[in-house]
Image (cartoon, helix red, strand yellow):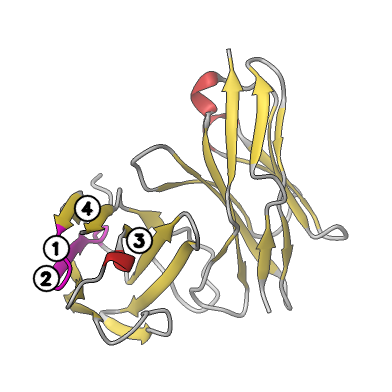
Amino acid sequence: AQSVAQPEDQVNVAEGNPLTVKCTYSVSGNPYLFWYVQYPNRGLQFLLKYITGDNLVKGSYGFEAEFNKSQTSFHLKKPSALVSDSALYFCAVRDMRSSYKLIFGSGTRLLVRP
Amino acid sequence: DAGVIQSPRHEVTEMGQEVTLRCKPISGHNSLFWYRQTMMRGLELLIYFNNNVPIDDSGMPEDRFSAKMPNASFSTLKIQPSEPRDSAVYFCASSLDGQGSNQPQHFGDGTRLSIL
């Protein structure tokens, strides 16, 4: 069965410092991996995706994510955090054999302090 | 470029009443999803439409929930009769999909539903 784990409920980081939000996945085939961000009272916004190829994927707002097949991980990173990055972040996985279903993690709240 | 549009943004009603949530997907998208988000259960997929046809409704909680997609630009999610445990944020999302598609889903801003 497909699953996504986000082991940290909350990540705290100081503005200007690098941030990492962790995600591990389990699928039976090759995965499509996604990161979304949710701001208060808003829907989920697509940040970036891994399909194939380069293991380092760049996305919106300076975020990037590193795909590691051996560790089945897809951690979200940013070199320098902004207070405005504070939000709820979701990792999601789709088995390549599925045409539609995304499996979401439980979400990680990122708090960037000034 | 308009995103996914949901209405109403907020709905407060008494238990037993009928509730109808509406969604306009992004033009040209052929897949539509309804999700429910709660603190306890996170994001749950309720139903998936492809080319206006319901493909997977296994996430619909019970017979009180129904969803329709009469055309490519409109979908509704109806709860009748509503119960307090239905209180949640309901999201609609759309995407351009086919078998094995890698396209992301685009979400609306949701309807916050409170059943008293």
Q: Earlier in the sequence, mark 1 or mark 4?
A: 4
SS at circle 1: loop
Q: Earlier in the sequence, mark 2 or mark 4?
A: 4
Q: Nearer the viewer, mark 3 or mark 2?
A: 2
Judged left or right of residue A28, residue B92 is left
The reply to whether the magenta stretch includes residue B10 is no
Above or below residue B76? Residue A22 is above
Q: CA distance from mark 2 to mark 1?
A: 6 Å
SS at circle 3: strand
Amino acid carrying label 1: it is Glu
Q: Are the numbered discs 2 and 4 placed on the same chain, yes or no? A: yes
Q: Which residue shows up at 63% across the image and 16% down it? A: A15
Quadrant location of the N terminus of chain A in the rendered image = bottom right
Q: Residue B93 shows which numbered tag? A: 3
Q: Are the numbered discs 3 and 4 placed on the same chain, yes or no? A: yes
* Residue matched to label 1: B14
Q: Earlier in the sequence, mark 3 or mark 2?
A: 2
Q: Quadrant of residue A105?
A: bottom right
Judged left or right of residue B84, residue B74 is left
The percent coordinates of residue A72 (x first, y second) are 80, 60
Amino acid carrying label 3: it is Ala
The percent coordinates of residue B25 (x first, y second) are 25, 61
Pointer 3 local density, CA inside 10 Å: few below 14, some 14–19, many at least 20: many
Q: CA distance from mark 1 to mark 3?
A: 27 Å
Front residue of A34 and B19: B19
Q: Residue B5 shows which numbered tag? A: 4
Judged left or right of residue A70, residue A14 is left
